[in-house]
Image: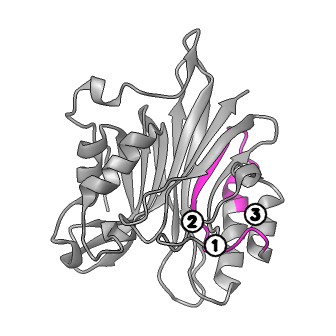
Amino acid sequence: MRRREFLSALPVAAVAASGCVTGGRVRSLRVLSYNLHHSEGTDGKVDLERIARVVRESRADLVALQEIDVNTQRTGRVDQAAEYLRLTGLHGQFGKAIDFQGGAYGQMLLSRWPMEDFRVHLLPNPKRREQRIAVSALIALPGGPRLRFIGAHLDASREDGDRWLQVGRLQDLFANDLVPSIIAGDFNDRPESRVMVRMLSLWEDASAAHAQPTIPAEHPEARIDFVLLRPPGAWRSVHSEVLPESVASDHRALLVEIRVR
């Protein structure tokens, strides 16, 4: 799918709330990771507005969304990526993982500031299951350096062999990057798993100090959604929470506030 960037027609006032800015420089960021289940809630309804409301009310500066439908049959041929840009007023880009039901299915990054160098990275898929991807972009913070924002969604199979390889690919792509980086997404594994132990050997878990489960949405029991930071010392985690919305998707959203050092 052609890479696209949309700028919403919403007035600037609609997105005025942002990360803490002092002296013209961003000092803290609010980062949201949310698996949308193609915008279908636990009540069986596809409702983009209630998802967008979660994003707006979180006042997130950077948002990683997983399981986005674009023009698919099951969600009424709606371009969900375009709709989320319109409904949130943020900058954003969609990355296709697979063709699906006459449209596309994948991930999306949203940002309060324009994105550059948006890329879709294919992750290993030796068992030929559903193709998984990571998406990344460079974002210039006002008054400060650029950061790399990455969204990820790993294999969901019970057997973790593909996830193990996918985490290895993420390390190869981003762990040696000189640009300060944030990965947010659904890793489909718990923090104590060998997959996440491998990932966390090189990345800081921004929500570890206030860890909460994110799935299933009605009564969360497992923590499989993460916001991860690199390099050590570039960030300080200030606060994290799992948002209380329990109907809009089968996951709850993870919100983290981090301080830029």
Measure the alpha-carbon separation of dots 2 and 1: 6 Å
Residue closer to the observer: 58 or 76: 58
Closer to the chain start, of discs 2 and 3, is 3
Residue drawn 46% across the image and 28% down it? 18
Inter-mark Cα distance, 1 to 3: 17 Å
Tell me the number on the disc at residue 3. Answer: none
> In the rendered view, would you say 240 is above or below 132?
above
The spot of residue 57 in percent (x, y) is 39, 41
User: SS class of the residue under badge 2?
Assistant: loop
**Region of the chain picked out in magenta, as a range:** 171-192
3D distance between C-alphas at marks 2 and 3: 19 Å
Q: Which residue is mark 2?
A: 214
Q: In the image, is residue 99 above or below residue 62?
A: below
In the rendered image, which residue does mark 3 sit on?
199
| Amino acid on which the number 1 mark rests in the picture | Ala
Circle 2/circle 3 CB separation < 8 Å: no
User: Residue 247 colored magenta?
Assistant: no
Kindly identify which residue carries mark 1.
222
Q: Crowdedness of circle 2 by 10 Å Cα count: few (<14), some, many (20+)?
A: many
The image quadrant where one finds the C terminus is: top right
Callouts 2 and 1 close, C-beta under 8 Å: yes
